[in-house]
Image: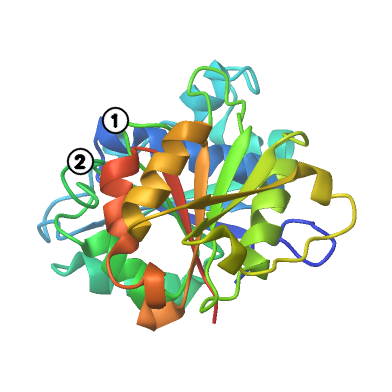
Amino acid sequence: MSLVDSSGAPTLADIIHPTDLTLLSETAFAHALALTLACKGHLAIVHAGDPEADQDPDWTGFPGVRSLLSRWGLIDRATPRGAIADALGIRVSKKLVPGSDPVAALEHFVDEHGCDLLVLATRARDGLARLLSGSVAEELTRRTDVPALFLPPEGRGFVDLATGRARLRNLLVPVDHATPQHEAVETAFGLADLLGCPDALVHLLHVGPADQAPSVAVAPGQEQRLRRASAEGAVVPGIVATAGRLDADLIVMATHGHDSFLDGLRGSTTEQVLRQAGRAVLALPVL
């Protein structure tokens, strides 16, 4: 599932950002909002909880859209909530999804409303998502087969929280023979262009002998922005080490739907890379 069409134009109409209502979600929220601005789409900020029947949700805990847009110099702080759509061409909604099972509640919300991209906060070194404990973020993306952007609050993102500007200079795309890579490479280029980073380089990484790397074709004009790399040894250390060496701003990893990664990219590779790389990771289902 690509985030751009064959011409490179974005297909991001609906972005969902699940939030735990803490500052740990701030980095992910900023990325979700920046992407919404770039594609002129709809951002749904969603919290899955189980409030008491006699209590109203604490809406003040949701991220402040107007305050962040004001910090980025895009609106005046006094701009009415209803004027944001007219001023910036985006829609933002805040939803509380009741339910004691956060995965099931969020899965139902995604199925009911549709989603082109999930933007999720993670804990880079303590496993996935404080948003929801344990492996809930991974489980949610596995159930929904929706592209998911994971942001480690204590690590590297690619949107400046102070200005809203994106910095994508190096994007890393691991490749193997088992998983189709065209959409991942296409998305990497398209995302960089969408966010105003036309000089960004896309690095294809094959963990294994260089002469056994899969052949990946790109669109005319992209070859000059494409680099090929190889690494020896195990897959996860190879990805993490190369991301560090390149100072990668984003790792784009093609997945195979409910079967997760195939061959060298099998099982919990995404989670391991998230824990060890400390960088933004985009998991892109290839169905």
Residue 23 % position (x, y): 27, 30
Q: Which of the labelled discs sits on residue 120, or is there none? A: none
Q: CA distance from mark 2 to mark 1?
A: 9 Å
Amino acid bearing label 2: Arg
Q: Position of residue 25 (x, y in %)?
A: 32, 38
* Secondary structure beneath label 2: loop
Could you say which quadrant of the image residue 107 lies in? bottom left
Q: Which mark is residue 154?
A: 1
Q: Earlier in the sequence, mark 2 or mark 1?
A: 2
Asked if one can make out residue 213 in the rendered structure from this viewpoint, the answer is no
Residue on which disc 2 sits: 125
Q: Compared with residue 153, is residue 151 higher up or lower down, i.e. above or below?
A: below
Image quarter in which the N terminus is found: bottom right
The residue closer to the viewer here, 52 or 241, is 241
Question: Cβ–Cβ below 8 Å for labels 2 and 1?
Answer: yes
Residue 137 sits in quarter: bottom left
Please indicate whether residue 119 sits to the left or right of residue 107 in the image: right
Seen at 49% across and 71% down, the residue is: 113
Amino acid type, mark 1: Glu
Residue ID at (69%, 40%): 201
Residues packed near mark 2 inside 10 Å, few (<14), some (14 to 19) or many (20 plus)? some
Percent across and percent down for residue 157 are: 45, 34
User: Along the horizontal axis of the image, is 263 left or right of 85?
Assistant: left
Position of residue 57 in the picture relative to residue 204 (left or right): left
Q: Which structural element holds mark 1?
A: loop
